[in-house]
Amino acid sequence: MKYIVCEEPGIFLLNDKQKPERAADEALIKIHRVGICGTDLHAYAGNQAFFKYPRILGHELSGEIIDVGDNPQNLKNGDRVLVMPYVSCGDCVACRQAKTNCCTNIEVLGVHTDGGMQEVLAIRTELLISSENLSYDEMALVEPLAIGAHALRRAALKAGETIVVVGCGPIGIGILKLAQLQGAHTIALDVAESRLEFVKEKIGVDHIVNVSQNAVAEVAKITNGELATAVFDATGNKRALESGVDYMAHGGRYILVGLSKDDLLFNHPAIHAKESSILCSRNATLEDFQLVLNNLKHFPSDVFITHKVNFTEMITHFDSWLSPENKVIKAMVSFTD
Ligand SMILES: [Zn+2]
Ligand SMILES: [Zn+2]
């Protein structure tokens, strides 16, 4: 079977290998879609934390079960499934508190262990969610949105709050839309005017602010000087991460969703004066996936998937997805029609 491996930063290879065997608690999945996200772009560019090469990328996955034994979820051959790509140990200190998303031994598919850019993948059945009526495109969109759902749960968002989301890629978009559905007023920040236009037109956010134009003053103006009670960073950019608290109200929460490789520096009096709650949000859990599945009709796949290519052609297109002028929101790799 064919697979694509990221051999080292900047180099993908299309190769052949044996189909995997499955363990008793695993299913074999014929992969239909792989969504491309910031993690994949950073891994290819060589600036992703938690990363070793060579690695088969791909963690936003949907496909079809082609071989499965008895399993607690009653999954059968032919079932259409999406993958929760976080393999946790089940008995570490985090797992025992149901925080499988930050398991001490976590292996995220396509990051710590090989992912879905291969025709067939063996995966534990407990990490699969089946759906009879969603398309493969829709199913492959659930994982990045679940990241946003988890961030909102970390923030314990309440209806009526005004939030700032910095970074209007797929993760930021998910946070904005799900927050709106939970009754929040939304302010979206980005450096790219095209992304701000996208969230204004397609998501209907309440306010857009370009980071390069005195954004703190703009957010203050919108909020009658109070600033936002919850701020989410969905950029993973060091400078953006360090300035997120500037948009936050006294007594507010700052949720770090994007991941930077660097140390972050905060001025202590500035964060202390606000009694800042600084929270990291890592991966997602089944609960987050379910919240997204219940709200998926608000995320039409034809709006979010801006670029689509066949698996064997991915390598030639990948470079172009790194360029902001191509206005990629979500690129999707397809194994079938
Ligand atoms: Zn991702
Ligand atoms: Zn664990």
Image (cartoon, rainbow, N blue to C red):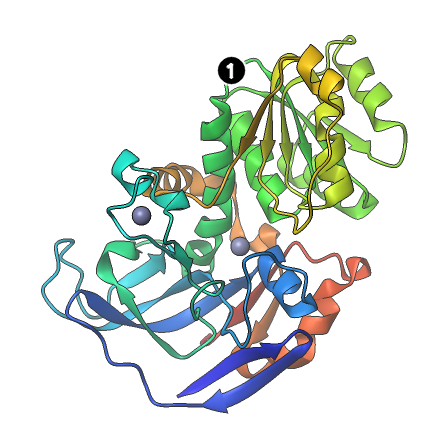
Position of 310 relative to 133 (above/below):
below
- Residue depicted at x 47% and y 36%: 149
- Residue depicted at x 46% and y 67%: 33
Residue 37 appearing in the image:
no
**To which quarter of the image does residue 150 belong?**
top left
Q: Position of residue 43 (x, y in %)?
A: 62, 65
Q: Amino acid at mark 1?
A: Ala
In the rendered image, which quarter contains the N terminus? Answer: bottom left
The residue that label 1 is drawn on is 159
- Count every numbered label the image shows and give the total: 1
Q: Position of residue 103 (x, y in %)?
A: 36, 47
- Residue depicted at x 29% and y 45%: 92
Q: Nearer the viewer, residue 225 or 244?
A: 244
Q: Position of residue 274 (x, y in %)?
A: 67, 13
Q: Position of residue 17 (x, y in %)?
A: 40, 90
Q: Nearer the viewer, residue 180 or 23?
A: 23
Q: Nearer the viewer, residue 78 or 169?
A: 169
